[in-house]
Image (tube, rainbow, N blue to C red):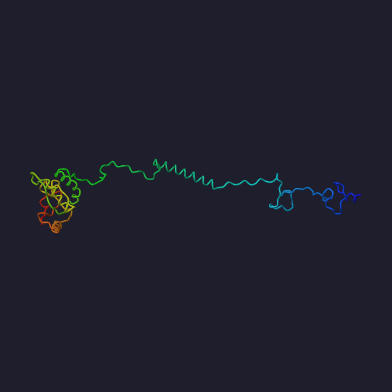
Amino acid sequence: MEDEEASRCPSCGDALLPDALYCIGCGSSRLAPPAPHRPLFVDEVGDEAATPRSTRAYFFDDAPPPPARRPGRTLPILVMIGVLVLVAGVLGFVFGKDGVGSGRPEAEPSTDPTTSEPSSPPSVDPDAPPEDQLLRISRLDTEAASKLIGTWIPQLAAVGAGDGGDVDWHRALTRYQELKTDHPDVLLLDTGEWPSSYVKPGMYAVVVPYPSDTAAPALEWCVEQGLSSTNCAAKHLEISGDPTDNYDAQ
């Protein structure tokens, strides 16, 4: 009976051919169904060899979530650089505008009139009267002449009133200008300001600032320039003493 039942299909009851894997009548498989099972995890294996990570199987509900993607570091670095640049710009604007933190304080304008220098050299008004122009020129030449005190220098001419009386100041100014053209370095001295060098006040002496210790070099200069004794002599500038000893002719 067992052999006869085994030779028939359990599904439809038709006869089965010997060693047949399927029923001809209904197509049912004669193979035994596999036993149900599930893969074991590493902690369930016990002493058995652990399953390699590359071959581990998970059910859909048991699979671990994928690792969270780490945000890129480029964007935060760029943001930080931008913030630093912005802060530096604001601080530079504030400190530069208000002058706070400056390593070198600004110089305050000086109010001392003695330390100020004229922006341009003093000039003589060409429209002023001749006597005023001569006086102005002598005042401007006083500082340079004071450096010649105690020395012998060539003197080219002396123009002016002398003993007093009417003077052609226009002619005197013209004579000075002619000598200034030929010898640009000449100085104009008010004889009244040099009583130890000149006997007569009220005149203007035209001198050359080539100092020497004796009268000889000054007289030699006159000769080298081709000037006669009436047009060039030696003058010793002094601020004290007898003026009669401060003149020497060729």
Is 49 placed left or right of 185 in the picture?
right
Q: Tell which of 132 and 188 is nearer to you.
A: 132
Screen quadrant of the C terminus: bottom left
**Residue 105 lies in what quarter of the image?**
top left
- Where is residue 207 drawn, in percent x and y? 15, 52
- Where is residue 118 drawn, in percent x and y? 25, 45
- Where is residue 17 drawn, in percent x and y? 86, 53
77 relative to 219, above or below: above
Which residue is at the far front? Answer: 25
- Where is residue 30 drawn, in percent x and y? 83, 50
Q: Tell which of 65 and 194 is nearer to you.
A: 65
Q: Tell which of 242 and 190 is nearer to you.
A: 190
Is 88 placed left or right of 47 in the picture?
left
Total number of numbered discs in the rendering: 0
Q: Tell which of 153 and 130 is nearer to you.
A: 130
